[in-house]
Every structure is written in C-alpha cells, then in structure tokens.
Image: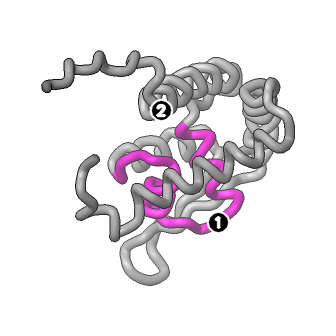
Amino acid sequence: MSQEPQPPDALESLIGYQLKHLQSVLRSRMDEALRPLGISTPQYACLELLRRAPGASNSELARGAFVTRQTMNTLLKGLQDRGLVTRAAKAETGRALPTTLTDEGGRTLDQAVERVERISALMVSSLDEELKRHLGEALDLCIGALEDEDTKGAPER
C-alpha cells in the first residue's frame, strides 16, 4: 500500500518564507522612512551600533549590520563624508581604525530612531504584550537553533 504524495505546503505558509517576506517589507519601509534623512537602513544600523559601541571596528560594525566588510567600508566613507562619523587617521593598535559618531551623526540618529520605532510599533500593533513577548522568545530560539554548533550535523527530517 503506497501513500500518495502530499502536495507541498503553500510557500506563503512556510516560516522561513514568512520571515524573509517580513524582512523585505520591513527593510522597504525603513528605507522609505530614512530616505528624507539621507541615510539607508544599513547606515542607520551602523550609526546605532556606533552609539552603543563607540570606537567599534569596521569588522564589528559589518557583523552587527549584516553586511560585508567591504560594504561597511563604503557605508562608513559615505557617513564620514557627510560628517556623521569620524574615523581615526591611524590605528592606535593593530590595523582597526576606530569610528565614532559626531554630534551631527547623533542628531541624525535621534531622528532616525523615531522613524524606525514608529515602523516597529506598527509592525507589532496587532499583537498584545504577551504575543510580542512570545514572538521575541520564539525568534531567539530559532536564531539559537541555527547558530548552535550542535545542529550542524543534525539529521534532516
């Protein structure tokens, strides 16, 4: 007795697809909101990271903003040309050139944060506080499962 093949789940119901769709819409909305400030979403992420970790290296910023080091170099050059960040001309130790926000960069970031927070609030506006907490916990678990070394050799299901 053979089982008939089951039709695949609709693409739109797959969690990975839903996450990618959400990421795409979120990025688009953030880019729209940040455009009048003259910055992109990755530039916003870079400014936010620098506020939280002044002097961060190019590699640290690239990892935090989910871009390559080469892309981060380009982003930093643009931010530096606009006077939003400063980079040391010479590394104090090693090769990393520490980067910091300027006062203008801080003001631009403050405006950007307001815009991004409005989008984030809209994104979860149909969730109550308990669902928001569960969503955050579930996403953390998903991230952990994929980043966990032990799952690299896990059998496929």
Q: How far from the left and from the top, in percent, is residue 154?
A: 27, 61
Residue type at mark 1 is: Ala
Cβ–Cβ under 8 Å for marks 2 and 1: no
Q: Which residues are magenta?
A: 42-69
Outermost residue, front side: 1
Colour scheme of the rendered structure: one colour
First along the sequence among labels 2 and 1: 2
Nearer-the-camera pick, 151 or 21: 151
Q: Residue at the location (40% across, 16% down)?
A: 10
Nearer-the-camera pick, 127 or 52: 127
Q: CA distance from mark 2 to mark 1?
A: 33 Å
Characterize the local packing of mark 2: few (<14), some (14-19) or many (20 or more) Cα atoms within 10 angstroms. few
Q: How far from the left and from the top, in percent, is residue 104?
A: 75, 44
Q: Is residue 58 magenta?
A: yes
Picture quarter with the N terminus: top left
Q: Main secondary structure of the magenta part?
A: helix
Q: How far from the left and from the top, in percent, is residue 135?
A: 68, 43
The correct choice, above or below, for 50 with respect to 12 in the image is: below
Q: Is residue 20 magenta?
A: no
Outermost residue, right side: 129
Name the residue tied to disc 2.
15
Name the residue tied to disc 1.
53
Quarter of image, res 87: bottom right
The correct choice, above or below, for 140 with respect to 113 in the image is: below
Tell me the element at label 2: helix
Residue type at mark 2 is: Ile
